[in-house]
Amino acid sequence: MIEATHLFKHFGPVSAVRDVSLRADDGRITGLLGPNGAGKSTTLRMLYTVLKPDSGDALVDGYSVVREPLTAARRLGVLTHGAGIYPNLTARENILYFGALHGLTRQEARRRAGELVELLEMTEFADRRAKGFSQGQRLKTALARSLVHNPRNLILDEPTNGLDVMAVRALRRLLRQLREAGHCVLFSSHVMHEVNELCDELIVIADGTVIASGTPATIRARAQSGILEDAFVRLIGGEPA
């Protein structure tokens, strides 16, 4: 479970995040929505300990990202927006390297890499050097790296950006499998179809603060719209209700 309370983050005079509180539960897929510049990525970076909040805190399975950042980070698998992979390593070697960073033995890392190659349908390119990979192949490799230590919680920043239809469908299947296995999944996206297909809960951010949260049905009802995209636009002030 991931729970944030009263997060603030400033960059000089700019208030990127202002009093954000949110909760993402185990066995649920939670979507983080907002227009560009709303504070989504900054919020996620505080949750996965890359940025330290100016004030407030977040707990990952009860561990504080402020007081216990390393312990909290070990409970997370993170796929950052535009995540890079090592081009001179094969996909499998990328996964094995991250397994070693997470403290897995060589045998454990190899076993886990094999599982992920199978799960993410990477067999065709698993032992090719990553230089020249397609966007979908790069994303699968980066996602496998984030899952190598079998984290309870997963944070994804715009995971479907630039993917073709088949890669998106594969990712969707994986996220549902993780939810069914009891994992906590928190992801940001601009793609309303993906959000509507996957999410159990939604958190809408605008101008660095949470303006709405709840199930997709709750969000639609609040904005008096039967279509999630229209509801989102109304909530962020794009159109009158």
Image (spheres, grey):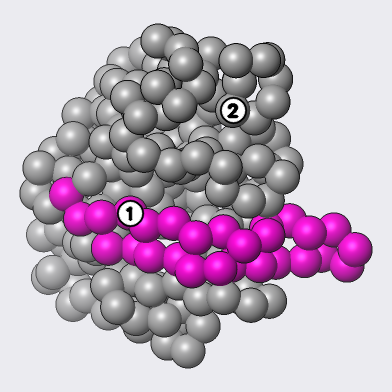
Write down the quadrant of residue 148 in the picture: bottom left
CB contact under 8 Å: marks 2 and 1: no
238 above or below 207?
Answer: above
Q: Amino acid at mark 2?
A: Leu
Q: Is residue 99 magenta?
A: no
Spatial distance from mark 2 to mark 1, Cα to Cα?
A: 21 Å
Eye-nearest disc, 2 or 1? 2
- Coordinates of residue 217 in the picture (x, y in percent): 32, 24
Residue that numbered label 1 is attached to: 24
Q: How many residues crowd around disc 1 within 10 Å: few (fewer than 14), some, or many (20 or more)?
A: many
Badge 2 or badge 1: first in the primary sequence: 1
Q: Could you tell whether 222 is left or right of 35 in the image?
A: left
What percent of the width, then of the height, locates residue 209? 63, 51
Q: Is residue 34 above or below residue 194?
A: below
User: Residue, x 45% and y 66% (percent of image)?
Assistant: 4
Give the image location of residue 203, x and y in percent: 46, 42
Which secondary structure, mark 2? Answer: helix
- Between 209 and 144, the one lying in front of the other is 209
Q: Please give the range of residues in magenta.
A: 1-27
Kind of residue indicated by mark 1: Ala
The quadrant of the picture occupied by the C terminus is: top right
> Image check: 71 left or right of 111?
right
Q: Residue at x 31, y 16 (%)?
A: 166
Question: Secondary structure of the magenta portion, mostly?
Answer: strand
Residue 235 is tagged as: 2
